[in-house]
Amino acid sequence: MLGFVVLLYLARNAVTVLLLAIFLSSALDALVIRLEAWRIPRLLGTILVFLGFLTIMAVLIYSMVPIAILELRGIFNNLGGIVGQILSLGVPPQVTDLLNNNLTSISNMFFASGSSFIGIFGKLFGGISSLIAVLVTAFYLTLSRDGVGRFLRAVFPEDLEDKVLSIYYRSKKKIGHWFQAQLILSLIVGFLVFIGLWTLGVKYSLILALFAAVFELVPIVGPIFGGGLAVLVGLSDSFTTGMYVLVLFLIIQQIENHVLVPLVMKKALDIHPVIILIALLAGVEVAGFVGLVLAVPAAVIAGELVDDWIATKEAAKETSRKQLEL
C-alpha cells in the first residue's frame, strides 16, 4: 500500500492530468449522449461537442482576455493608490504591507514572462502540454460509450468492478448536477457584478466581473475573494465608492442565496460545508489552482466512498445478526 501511495506521488502530474480528463469527459458526455438521441453518430457527436467547447474557449480568450489583461495590469500598477487609500482608513501598516507584498508577488507571477495569455495560462495549469494531454485524454474517454467506465474496469480487479463503477456513476451524476448549476450561477453573478460595477463607474469592471464569475466556481471562499478584490479597487478610488461596491456585493449575495440557489441548485450536492472547505484546503496544498478545480469532485467521491463503507458495514452487521438468530 505504501509503495502504491509513493507511486501516485511520483506520478502526481500524470494523475492530475487523468483526473482532469475524467472530470471533463464526464461533464461533456451528457451532451454527446443527447446528440446520440438525435441519431448523430457518437464519433461525430464527440467531435462536434469538443469543437464547440474549444470554439467557446477560443472566443472567450481572444475577445475578452486581452482586455482583461490590460485591466489587470492597471490594477497592479495602481497598487500604491490602493494601499494608500487603505492606509488613510486607519488600517494597521502591517496589514497593508502584507497585502502589498502578496499582490506584488501575484503581479510578478502573471507578468514576469510577458503579458501574453499563453504565459498566464501555462502558469495556472502547468503548461500547454498538460492542457493538450487533458483534452486528448478526455476526447478518447468520451469517444467510447461509457469510456470512463470501461477505463475503470480495465484498471481495477474484477472483484472491485461493481463497487468502483457504482461509486463512479453516483459521483458522476452529482458532479454533473453541481457543475451545470455552478456554471449557471457563475454566469449570472458575473453579469450582475459587471452591470453593477459599470453603473457605479468602478475601474476595471470587466476583469473584476470575470474574477467574480471564476471565483464563484470555488465554494464558500470564492465569493469572498471576488468581492474583496472589487472592494479594494473601489477603495482606491474613494471610500464612498468602496462602500458602494461592498453594498453591491452584499445585495448580489442575498439575491444568489435566496433566489438563484433555490432555483438552480435543486439537484446539487448534499455535502456538509466543512467537508468542502477541508477538500479545498487539501486541494490547494496538493495541486494549487488545479486542486481547487478538483476539490469538489474529490469531496463527492470521498462522500460516496464513506457512504459505501457505511452501507457495507451495516450489511455485515445485519448478516452477523441473522446468523446469530439461526
Image (cartoon, helix red, strand yellow):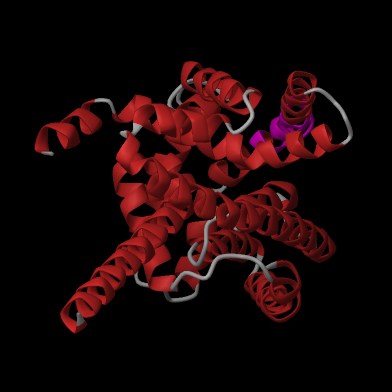
Picture quadrant of residue 48: top right
Picture quadrant of residue 34: top right
Q: Classify the position of the N terminus by image quarter.
A: top left
Q: Is residue 325 above or below residue 190?
A: below
Res 112 visible: yes
Res 116 visible: no
Taking the spot 62% from the left edge, 51% from the top edge, the residue there is 176
Task: Give residue 158's position: percent from left, percent from top.
Answer: 34, 35
Task: Give residue 26's position: percent from left, percent from top.
Answer: 59, 40
Taking the spot 59% from the left edge, 33% from the top edge, the residue there is 146
Q: Is residue 7 above or below residue 257?
A: above
Magenta stretch holds residue 57: yes
Q: Which residues are magenta?
A: 54-69
Relative to 293, is 25 on the left or the right? right
Most foreground residue, 47 or 190: 47
Taking the spot 19% from the left edge, 28% from the top edge, the residue there is 7
Q: Is residue 253 above or below residue 188?
A: below
Magenta stretch holds residue 291: no
Most foreground residue, 274 or 248: 274
Q: Main secondary structure of the magenta part?
A: helix
Residue farthest toward the right in the current orientation of the protein: 38
Most foreground residue, 155 or 211: 155
Residue farthest toward the left in the current orientation of the protein: 2
Count of marks overlaid on the render: 0
Q: Classify the position of the C terminus by image quarter.
A: bottom left
Task: Give residue 113's position: percent from left, percent from top.
Answer: 47, 21
Picture quadrant of residue 31: top right
Taking the spot 45% from the left edge, 67% from the top edge, the residue there is 87
Relative to 103, is 139 on the left or the right? right
